Image (spheres, helix red, strand yellow):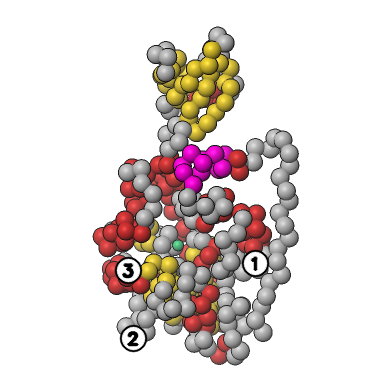
Amino acid sequence: MTRYSIRLLCGGSLASLILVSACGAQPVKARENRTITFSMAEWMAGEPPKGEVAAIEPEVDGGNAALSATLWMQTSAEYRAMVRQTFGSAERRLRDALNDRRWTAAPREQGANYEALPPAVILDVDETLLDNSPYQARLIKDRASFAPESFASWCQEQKATAMPGAERFAQSAVDLKIAVFYVTNRPKSLEATTRAQLAALGFPLDEETDTILTRGEDPQWASGKSTRRAHIARTHRILMVIGDDLGDFIDDHKVPAAQRRSLAEGHDDLWGARWILLPNPAYGPWEGAVLSFDGALGEADRVKIKMGALRDGRGATSAPTPPPPPLEVAP
Ligand SMILES: [Mg+2]
């Protein structure tokens, strides 16, 4: 339920009311000990009870910011169908990718004579292969924010489930003799538990080669994933990259939101065949981009900035999206 703080002008006096629910007829308690009942539908239809709505502000509530997104990921048929269809579509393209020797999903990292290299796919882990939504749910219920310690505890519980279609995709790749690499921004300290979790869920792991490439495992492996792609590209032709975050594909993505959209649009030739993207409305740099990546913001300011970033089609027209940057393709 979305909680709103609304102000009503009643008989010339300003009263702050709390709207308890977003649906159905609900009692609304005024801080002046008056109760008015009305429905969100009535209110949205422009029929506020006795008075004039002067302002609407979301209640400062960190949990609710991610509530609908996490609920959608956990309960909707649409999200699960979308993930399944994405992996199914990727699986059907594997043979094309395999048979076309010029095909690569890493045009920047792939070196000379990559055509002769054995094939590989690169998979992100969190919200690509593993569903960590219970961790998000805990944050919401506990009114807590992401913290590395709590996330590490969640990982060590090994309660994440596999995303629908993910394990089948990975197994299909192995059946076609395509190596599967897991490139994750989980830290090295979580590699062993991640390996155990992936193995338990049936994801293929190479007994001889380390195919789980964690952040910081090598001094060159920062959160940007291009150095890890380059590492794989030295020995393999990378057929596909699958992830839920622009950062799974492009390093310099921590830029303003319009620029991120422009970056994505600049790679339209890769999306859907070589770069496979899954939705993640619960968290990610897309949100940080709106907030100028300012981690020090309080919840009230975060909500205020997000409200300011919403386009409602009224007032000044927003600036057009800048043109996409030219794609650099390695020879
Ligand atoms: Mg991810």
Q: Identify the residue shown where x is 62% and y is 62%.
A: 264
Disc 3/disc 2 C-alpha distance (Å) = 19 Å
Compared across the picture, whether 322 is left or right of 236 comes to right
Q: Residues within 10 Å of mark 2 (few under 14, many from 20)?
A: few
326 lies above or below 21: below
Which stretch appears magenta? Answer: 297-307
Compared across the picture, whether 327 is left or right of 281 comes to right
Disc 2/disc 1 C-alpha distance (Å) = 34 Å
Disc 1/disc 3 C-alpha distance (Å) = 32 Å
Question: Which label sits in the foreground, 1 or 3?
Answer: 3
Q: How many marks?
A: 3
Q: Identify the residue shown where x is 61% and y is 89%.
A: 112
Please identify the residue farthest to the front as the structure is shown.
Answer: 296
Name the spot of residue 240 as percent of width and height, x first: 53, 73
Q: Quadrant of the N terminus?
A: top left
Element carrying mark 1: loop
Q: Which residue is mark 2?
A: 208
Question: Which label sits in the foreground, 3 or 2?
Answer: 3
Using the image, tell me which numbered label, if any, was put on residue 267.
1
> Mark 2: which amino acid?
Glu
Name the spot of residue 314 as percent of width and height, x first: 70, 35
Element carrying mark 3: helix
Q: Are the residues at dot 1 and dot 3 in contact (C-beta closer than 8 Å)?
A: no
